[in-house]
Image (cartoon, rainbow, N blue to C red):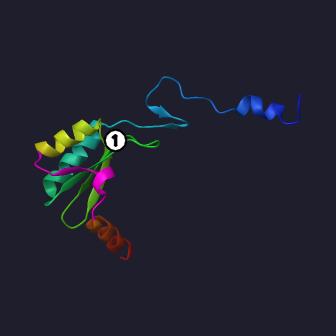
Amino acid sequence: MGLFDRFRRGSGMRRPGGDRSRTGSTTVRSASAADEQHLRDFVTTRRGVEGFVEPRTAVSDVTLLLVAHDGEWTRRRVPSVEWAHRFANQFQVPSYDAAVVGIPQRMRDYNRRKKNL
């Protein structure tokens, strides 16, 4: 038995099981009806809204970023990329793949204005 063997046995990294909602050591919360309602409220109460669909990452599921004309924004988990684009089409909101086009400058400007208040 080596000096550090007892530490290796119990604390080894384990692979995630077959549960697709788990990635490594984090649990990814799935989209809910409350998320959808929040997105609906945002779209219907702001003008000039655009949607940016963000792909799944190691720490979060697919998200839909909505940005209004003045840069105000919200982000919520959604069931899939296809769902996000259908949602945007339903409300006549242009939707883009955020991995391709990035996020709009007006959102960064809005964040800067809010930070300086």
Outermost residue on the bottom side: it is 116
> Where are the magenta residues, as a range?
91-104
Q: Is residue 95 magenta?
A: yes
Instruction: Give the residue at x 71% y 33%.
Output: 11
Above/below status of 74 relative to 22: below
In front: 34, or 86? Answer: 86
- Residue 95's x, y, as percent? 20, 49
Mark 1 burial class by Cα count in 10 Å: few <14, some 14-19, many 20+: many
- Residue 92's x, y, as percent? 10, 49
Outermost residue on the front side: it is 100
In front: 29, or 58? Answer: 58
Q: Is residue 109 left or right of residue 29?
A: left
Instruction: Give the residue at x 26% y 63%.
Output: 72
Q: Amino acid at mark 1?
A: Val
- Residue 43's x, y, as percent? 17, 52
Q: Is residue 66 magenta?
A: no
Above/below status of 32 relative to 50: above
Above/below status of 43 relative to 89: below
Q: Is residue 113 left or right of residue 48?
A: right
- Residue 105's x, y, as percent? 28, 67
Q: Quadrant of residue 66?
A: bottom left
Instruction: Give the residue at x 22% y 43%.
Output: 37
* Quarter of the N terminus within the rendering: top right
- Judged from the image, the secondary structure of the residue bearing numbered disc 1 is loop
Question: Which residue does the numbered mark 1 point to in the structure image?
Answer: 62
* Quarter of the C terminus within the rendering: bottom left
